[in-house]
Image: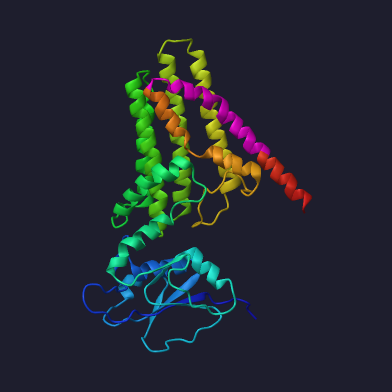
């Protein structure tokens, strides 16, 4: 006898018929997707099948195509709730992780509107607040200070405008990488004005790099390929910036080219070794739709891994901007020549410590 369990269901009740311009229908767009489709994709991401009660005057079939959701005839009691059914009231927009937490329990649940992980949309006046709620959910808890308070504000504004366009997350990754590589080329010159321009482009790369993940989550287009492209794109840009800084420093004529080249090799080598190590030991084997890069360690909860994650954040770009304004980008290269190899050795030490800890509990 098979022990296979059918997927949990998200039973979405049809909204009441409304008069005038303030009414919300399942076809109302929200950040590029009709509300019904957004609900269905959130349910699918949570491992559920969305079952929509057919609203009056709206054909949901085109909206729900490809989501795995189905539509049932509207009635006062369309389907009996079961222990694996979540009943969603009209106008409630859920987050996938919230739905996952609801189906982990045994009893049937009727979610409360505006609870954590859900938002109640009652009229068109609520749509701007719903947009802000969705966008705020894209900000990660462990982001650096400057990333959270500066870069995210700009990247979310860009993503909000791109959500309803055909622009894909992978396209944004490629644009971000190209901007970063263009910025790296400006460090080939020792002139402060050109270095500062390169640093600003480097910062723009970092801002645009946030848009690909935001669009992927907003459009439900996360993929393993996109995560890997994003990860290696970032590291290639960092390596290119360090290499160009080394060339620019050697061209300044302030000292023998041996030292800039040595510093560049150390910074680039440490960066690529760290990237390869993280990819091999912390990223491979993840689910296709899971975030590909969440921590530099396989045991992200430990104190050492939290410290390493903090060091891996990109707030250092602001230091590059300040130093470049004075034509001193090579000062940062010296720090990177020491810090990048040290970071790689720290990753190896954290991994060895994690393995020993795992063996001691096995």
Look at the image and tell me whether residue 261 can be seen.
yes
Q: Count how many numbered circles sit on residues in the image.
A: 0
Rendered location of residue 134, percent (x, y)? 39, 59
Q: Which is nearer the eye, 196 or 113?
A: 113
Q: Is residue 274 magenta?
A: no
Q: Which is nearer the eye, 232 or 144?
A: 144
Quadrant location of the C terminus in the rendered image: bottom right
Q: Is residue 330 magenta?
A: yes
Extreme residue toward the bottom, this view: 76
Predominant secondary structure, magenta span: helix
> Residue at horizontal 57%, vertical 49%?
284
> Residue at horizontal 59%, vertical 39%?
308
Does residue 192 lie above or below 134 as drawn?
above
Extreme residue toward the left, this view: 20
Q: What colour scheme was applied to this rendering of the protein? A: rainbow
Quadrant location of the N terminus in the rendered image: bottom right
Q: Which is nearer the eye, 73 or 22?
A: 22
Looking at the rendering, which quadrant does residue 68 occupy?
bottom left
In the image, is 325 to the left or to the right of 339? left
In the image, is 291 to the left or to the right of 65? right
Does residue 161 lie above or below 316 as drawn?
below
Look at the image and tell me whether residue 219 can be seen.
no
> Residue at horizontal 28%, vertical 55%?
165
In the image, is 330 to the left or to the right of 278? left
> Residue at horizontal 48%, vertical 43%?
231
Looking at the rendering, which quadrant does residue 3 occupy?
bottom right
Rendered location of residue 158, percent (x, y)? 32, 48
Rendered location of residue 55, percent (x, y)? 32, 81
The stretch in magenta equals: 326-349
């Amino acid at each position: 006898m098979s022990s296979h369990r059918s997927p949990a269901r998200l039973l979405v009740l049809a909204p009441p018929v409304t008069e005038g311009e303030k009414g919300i229908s399942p076809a109302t767009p929200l950040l590029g997707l009709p509300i019904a489709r957004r609900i269905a994709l959130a349910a699918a991401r949570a491992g559920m099948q969305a079952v929509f009660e057919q609203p009056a005057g709206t054909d949901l079939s085109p909206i729900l195509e490809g989501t795995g959701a189905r539509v049932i005839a509207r009635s006062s009691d369309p389907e009996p709730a079961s222990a694996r059914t979540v009943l969603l009231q009209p106008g409630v927009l859920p987050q996938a992780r919230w739905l996952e937490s609801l189906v982990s329990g045994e009893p049937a649940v009727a979610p409360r509107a505006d609870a954590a992980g859900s938002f109640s949309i009652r009229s068109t006046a609520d749509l701007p607040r719903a947009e802000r709620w969705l966008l705020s959910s894209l900000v990660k808890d462990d982001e650096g200070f400057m990333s959270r308070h500066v870069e995210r504000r700009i990247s979310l504004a860009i993503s909000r405008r791109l959500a309803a366009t055909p622009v894909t997350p992978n396209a944004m990754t490629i644009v971000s990488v190209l901007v970063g590589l263009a910025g790296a080329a400006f460090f080939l010159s020792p002139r402060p004005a050109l270095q500062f321009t390169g640093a600003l482009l480097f910062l723009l790369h970092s801002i645009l790099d946030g848009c690909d993940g935001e669009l992927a989550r907003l459009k439900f287009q996360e993929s393993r390929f996109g995560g890997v492209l994003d990860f290696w794109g970032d590291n290639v840009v960092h390596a290119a910036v360090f290499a160009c800084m080394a060339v620019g420093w050697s061209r300044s004529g302030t000292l023998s080219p041996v030292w800039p080249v040595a510093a560049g090799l150390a910074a680039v080598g440490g960066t690529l070794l760290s990237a390869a190590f993280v990819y091999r030991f912390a990223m491979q084997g993840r689910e296709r739709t899971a975030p590909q890069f969440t921590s530099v360690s396989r045991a992200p909860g430990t104190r050492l891994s939290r410290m390493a994650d903090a060091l891996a954040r990109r707030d250092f770009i602001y230091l590059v901007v300040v130093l470049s304004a004075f034509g001193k980008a090579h000062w940062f290269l010296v720090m990177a020549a020491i810090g990048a190899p040290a970071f790689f050795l720290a990753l190896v030490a954290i991994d060895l410590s994690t393995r020993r800890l795992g063996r001691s509990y096995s």
